[in-house]
């Protein structure tokens, strides 16, 4: 067989299947982005920082915010880093203590203000006994609880920010209002709070509203009462809560209101589009129908079509009105989710609310630090389907200065209004030809042709050899 032919074919096949290096990608330019904002950075500092505006999240093409660049006056990219600041306030329960409490009994026709209460205290000022009227409980044939005295003397003047009531799990459903008064001597009382409490059942869910916010009183004694026309409250415990707040440096927490959209052909299901990849960690869901309750599930997902891939929460929503006071469910906590698309579903019920719910998404904006390399004015450009995540090689240096933790404290600036760079067309990913697939198929096709050519050539050489052998045999004969 011809060795030159074999080497030639091998070289052709090797050349066709060897990956060719791709040309280096050119650095991004402002024209590759949809929108921008001017960053006025006064001279005199190396680092500047600002909170990302809502418009940036709305134009971002990914949850990692990879399509953001900072340009200087000459259009050169300068390094930046994103981070989320720590919480502004960390609320901690400095006190969470069970308090002694004493029911005050009176005739069914009496109210808390119409009776005389005799209180016995020990040397430390703690209440040890409470009697109403003349002290003879047998004088009340038909009696009921009209109030509770709560002993806070053990707290030694520490401010109480809330009372949390406890009742039996077998307590019947109720809703009512309560009045809280404070005193230092059990003689002069001052009204400090009113509140609405409730215990309601809805399907498999149970609503217990048992916390009464206070104004931080430090009085030794509290009195808890309710309107005369209201059923007596049967408590099993009272706890005092006091919170301390620690403030740290961070941008302001934001809330974005979104209206749910009914899903066509699917009653009780609503889609939610926040308009951007907001890093939401709290959601306030409000029913618009008065005196309504609904058991719901909340999902999130990567797209409008796949918005139910991850269940974020399930529970009870309520919008109740009692004696002019509105009672709503609290905001829910969700794990740091930057999902844009959500799905809310009501559990099947004939009493499901008619109007779509309102949702407020609470989120903490990222903070961006950039190096003022070159001359200003600088600009932030964002929203592009054609750029990948940057790698500036200086992230550790920039992160060192986040929240002023380095030797140089970044100056805080405010971006200007949004303007159009290349427009919304840049938000789409450019259609790129699948070169790798084409090269692979071309290599395989070239290899097949080369092998076929080699086979045909080899066959012809073998055939020529056989004919030559037969000719030589004929001459010898």
Image: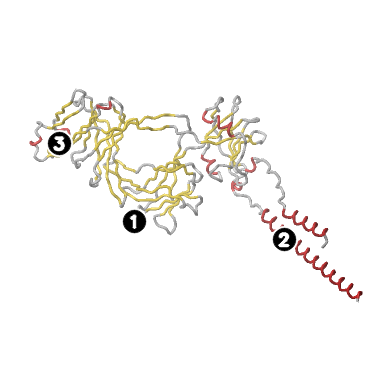
Q: Nearer the viewer, mark 3 or mark 2?
A: 2
Quarter of the view holding residue 320: top left
Determine whether the residue tagged by mark 1 lies in a helix, strand or loop: loop
Towards the viewer: 235 or 253: 235
Q: Position of residue 242 (x, y in %)?
A: 32, 31
Q: Quadrant of the C terminus?
A: bottom right
Q: Position of residue 390 (x, y in %)?
A: 61, 40
Quarter of the view holding residue 79: top right
Residue under the point 66% across and 54% down: 434
Q: Which residue is mark 1?
A: 349
Determine whether the residue tagged by mark 2 lies in a helix, strand or loop: helix
In the picture, the disc for residue 445 is 2
Gap in angstroms between the C-alphas marked 3 and 2: 98 Å
> Is tag 1's residue or tag 2's residue first in the polypeptide sequence?
1
> Is tag 3's residue or tag 1's residue first in the polypeptide sequence?
3
Q: Is residue 458 above or below residue 126?
A: below
Q: Position of residue 92 (x, y in %)?
A: 37, 32
In this rendering, position of residue 268 left or right of residue 251: left
Q: Quadrant of the N terminus?
A: bottom right
Gap in angstroms between the C-alphas marked 3 and 1: 43 Å
Q: Which residue is mark 3?
A: 105
Identify the image's colour scheme: rainbow, by chain, secondary structure or one colour.
secondary structure
> Is tag 3's residue or tag 2's residue first in the polypeptide sequence?
3
Would you say the residues marked 3 and 2 are in contact, meaning their CB atoms lie under 8 Å apart?
no
Crowding at dot 2, Cα within 10 Å, few <14 / some 14-19 / many 20+, comes out as some
Q: Nearer the viewer, mark 1 or mark 2?
A: 2
Gap in angstroms between the C-alphas marked 1 and 2: 63 Å
């Amino acid at each position: 067989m011809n060795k030159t032919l074999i080497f030639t074919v091998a070289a052709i096949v090797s050349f066709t299947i060897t990956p060719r290096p791709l040309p280096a990608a050119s650095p991004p330019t402002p024209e590759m982005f949809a929108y921008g904002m001017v960053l006025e950075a006064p001279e005199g500092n190396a680092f500047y920082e600002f909170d990302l505006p809502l418009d940036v999240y709305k134009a971002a093409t990914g949850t990692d915010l990879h399509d953001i660049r900072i340009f200087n006056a000459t259009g050169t990219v300068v390094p930046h880093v994103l981070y989320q600041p720590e919480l502004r306030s960390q609320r901690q329960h400095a006190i969470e203590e069970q308090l002694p409490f004493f029911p005050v009994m009176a005739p069914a026709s009496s109210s808390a203000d119409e009776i005389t209460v005799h209180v016995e205290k020990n040397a430390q000022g703690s209440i040890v006994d409470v009697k109403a009227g003349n002290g003879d409980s047998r004088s009340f044939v038909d009696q009921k609880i009209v109030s509770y005295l709560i002993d806070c003397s053990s707290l030694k003047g520490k401010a109480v920010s809330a009372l949390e009531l406890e009742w039996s799990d077998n307590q019947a459903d109720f809703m009512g209002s309560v009045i809280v008064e404070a005193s230092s001597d059990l003689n002069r009382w001052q009204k400090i709070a009113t509140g609405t409490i409730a215990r309601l059942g809805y399907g498999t869910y149970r609503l217990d509203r048992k916390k009464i916010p206070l104004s931080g009183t430090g009085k030794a004694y509290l009195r808890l009462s309710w309107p005369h026309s209201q059923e007596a409250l049967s408590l099993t415990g009272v706890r005092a809560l006091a919170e301390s707040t620690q403030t740290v440096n961070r941008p302001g927490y934001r809330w974005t209101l979104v209206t749910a959209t009914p899903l066509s052909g699917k009653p009780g299901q609503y889609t939610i589009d926040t308009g951007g990849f907001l890093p939401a960690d709290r959601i306030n869901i409000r029913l618009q129908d008065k005196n309504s309750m609904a058991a719901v599930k909340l999902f999130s997902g990567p797209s409008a079509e796949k918005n139910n891939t991850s269940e974020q929460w399930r529970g009870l929503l309520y919008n109740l009105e009692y004696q002019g006071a509105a009672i709503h469910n609290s905001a829910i906590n969700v794990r740091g989710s930057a999902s844009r698309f959500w799905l809310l579903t009501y559990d099947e019920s004939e009493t499901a609310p008619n109007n779509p719910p309102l949702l407020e998404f609470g989120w903490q904006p990222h903070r961006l630090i950039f190096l003022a390399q070159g001359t200003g004015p600088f600009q932030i450009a964002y929203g592009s389907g054609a750029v990948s995540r940057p790698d500036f090689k200086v992230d550790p240096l920039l992160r060192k200065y986040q929240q002023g933790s380095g030797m140089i404290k970044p100056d805080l600036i405010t971006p200007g209004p949004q303007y159009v760079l290349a427009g919304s067309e840049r938000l789409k990913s450019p259609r790129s030809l699948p070169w790798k697939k084409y090269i692979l198929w071309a290599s395989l096709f070239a290899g097949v042709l080369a092998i076929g050519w080699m086979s045909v050539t080899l066959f012809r050489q073998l055939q020529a050899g056989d004919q030559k052998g037969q000719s030589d045999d004929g001459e010898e004969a």
